[in-house]
Each structure stands twice: as C-alpha cells, then as structure tokens.
Image (cartoon, coloured by chain):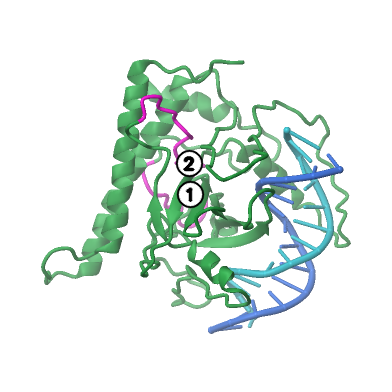
Chain colours: A green, B cyan, C blue
Amino acid sequence: MEGRDMLSWEQKTLLSELINGFDAAKKLQARLREAPSPSSSFSSPATAVAETNEILVKQIVSSYERSLLLLNWSSSPSVQLIPTPVTVVPVANPGSVPESPASINGSPRSEEFADGGGSSESHHRQDYIFNSKKRKMLPKWSEKVRISPERGLEGPQDDVFSWRKYGQKDILGAKFPRSYYRCTHRSTQNCWATKQVQRSDGDATVFEVTYRGTHTCSQAITRTPPLASPEKRQDTRVKPAITQKPKDILESLKSNLTVRTDGLDDGKDVFSFPDTPPFYNYGTINGEFGHVESSPIFDVVDWFNPTVEIDTTFPAFLHESIYY
DNA sequence: CCTATTTGACCAAG
DNA sequence: CTTGGTCAAATAGG
C-alpha cells in the first residue's frame, strides 16, 4: 500500500554499517562480560577495569542505538506513529499472526472502566491507557538467544538489567508459553522497558527475546537506597523455580544465555531492516537521582501526562535535533 | 516484614 | 468472536 520503507542506497548502506557496528559492539560487550580478565593477571582491581570497559562499551552501543534510531526516523518522516514492524520470528507458525499494522484511532470509545473484577480501585487504569498508547511507539527489537550447554548462564549479556516477570501466556501455535518481563524499577523510576521471552518450538536451546523500549532507569549504578536495608544487593537474575517440571528450569535459563543478534545478517543483499533500534529516552524524572545513562539529546518531559498526547512532540523535536 | 513470581481475569485490538 | 498483553491478588521465599 504505502511505500514508506523506501530508503535510498546511501541510507541503506549507512544503516547496514551502523547495524554492523552495533552488532559488533554488542558482541564485544558480551565478550567483555564473559571474560573479564583476558590477558595475564593485572595487579589493578579487575572489577574497576571491567566496570570501565563495560561503561565504554555501553556508550558505544548507546551511540549506535541513537544513530540508528535517528536515521530510521529521519528517513521516514511520513511514518511517525506507525508501530515498528519486527522481524518475523521463524517460528513454525502455520497461522502466522500479523503484527498489528498501523491502525490509526481504531477505537473511538473513550476509556471507561467499570473494572469487572470484584475489587475496586480502578483509577490505576489510567496508567495502563497511557502505557498502551505509547507502547506501540516504543522501539521494539528481538534477539535470538541460545542457551549455552556448559554454564555461562551467569553472563548477563545484554541483561544487566533486572527484570520482573509480570505475566505468562500461552501463544497460539507455540508449544511453550511466552513470558513477559518488565523492568524492576518501573514504578520507582518510571522505566518502561519490557521484554518477552518465547522459547522456540523447534530448537529447545533457542529462545526469542523481544525487547520493548529502553531503560531509563539507573539501575546500573550501584546505588543503595537510603531507606530500608542499605546492603541488599542481590541478583534476581536466575530463579531456581523448581516448582515442577524440568522444563520450567529450562525456562528460567532463558534470562541468561548467549545473546545472538539476528536479523542483522551482513550478507543479505535484500537487506531487510527488521526493526527499530532501541534507545528511547523518556526524559528524566524529577526523582532524587535522575541519573540517566548516556547524554540525552532529547528530553521528553511529557512522560507523565494523562491528557496530553505526546505523539507529535517527540518525533518533531527529534527531527530538529538531527539538523542541529 | 519485604520483594518477586504465579496465575486467573481483564482489556484492547484483530 | 479469538488472541496477545497486562494487571493484580494470591502465593512463594528471603
């Protein structure tokens, strides 16, 4: 219908290069995490070095992400509110469900909730609406993750973040349920990053992880809250969860596995740019520590505004900042 | 006591 | 209607 994905050759090439760099950076990141001390032993504190490396790599990755994001958006100015298409997972899905296309204002019905549940307190739905409206705009990308036979599960490749599971659903045509995770600091720092993990039907060792949005929280910083327990730094990365079948255990492994970026095949002449790169800065919260990683070129302060629609705001000024 | 997970129900969109 | 995504009460675990 609409040829919105028309990119010039220059842009394609640029995108390709950026993606390559992005991919490489991520791989490097994973590598650094796996092998913190590659060469001979150093007398310097390994932790500090590792941390510095991590920060550096993080900056690189972030840079790539932003570049990709900018390029993608600037290249298709006509496409503003259209949700980003995602790489179609190669799952053996007979009745493939197409991702929701660009449906503009499909529901005239105003948001009114009687809350079917017996419990009251339905005003929190507002957040849900606000969230659901934006959620389509959130950058979305997926990765294929394969569990490593040995261990290596400790390697939180991309997942330095702490996730909290908030749901699990059986997907039609999929043998295994899909798990939904959100950032642990969602309520505290308004970090709307989420991810879903779907175990592949075919390969029991492959999980498809789809991320939505990027972290705006500052959980990477080792900061302990002044209140409550000062030292409660524990990793909730892997939960044993030996509640039932071994399959659950396998599922729990999904959180930490070898990340393998896909859709970024460098040999494809067709070059199908699968999805939108990450990074999405919702601006700083007035919180005590509004420390957001990476310098925010754009700062949307409209993250919380029930009545105002931010749609046009943020692509517009973004566009401006491109020519900055 | 706290926080994280589980799990059925709810909701929006196709 | 179905289906994917989310919420929230109940539960598990420290």
- Residue C8 lies left or right of residue A142; in this view the side is right
**Dot 1 corresponds to which residue?**
A216
Q: Earlier in the sequence, mark 1 or mark 2?
A: 1
Mark 1 secondary-structure assignment: loop
Q: Chain of mark 1?
A: A
Is B14 above or below relative to A132? above
Is A219 above or below relative to A270? below
What residue appears at the point 48 percent right and 50 percent down from the top-left corner?
A: A215
Instruction: Name the spot of residue A191 as percent of width and height, x first.
Output: 54, 51
Mark 2 secondary-structure assignment: loop
Front residue (pair C8, A275): A275
Q: Is residue A147 magenta?
A: no
Q: Is residue A287 magenta?
A: yes
Q: Which residues are magenta?
A: A268-295
- Residue A244 lies left or right of residue A153; in this view the side is right
What residue appears at the point 62 percent right and 77 percent down from the top-left corner?
A: A243
Q: Residues within 10 Å of mark 1 (few under 14, many from 20)?
A: many
Is A220 above or below relative to A95? below
Type of amino acid under label 1: Thr
> Would residue A60 be visible to someone looking at this image?
no
Type of amino acid under label 2: Asn
**Dot 2 corresponds to which residue?**
A281
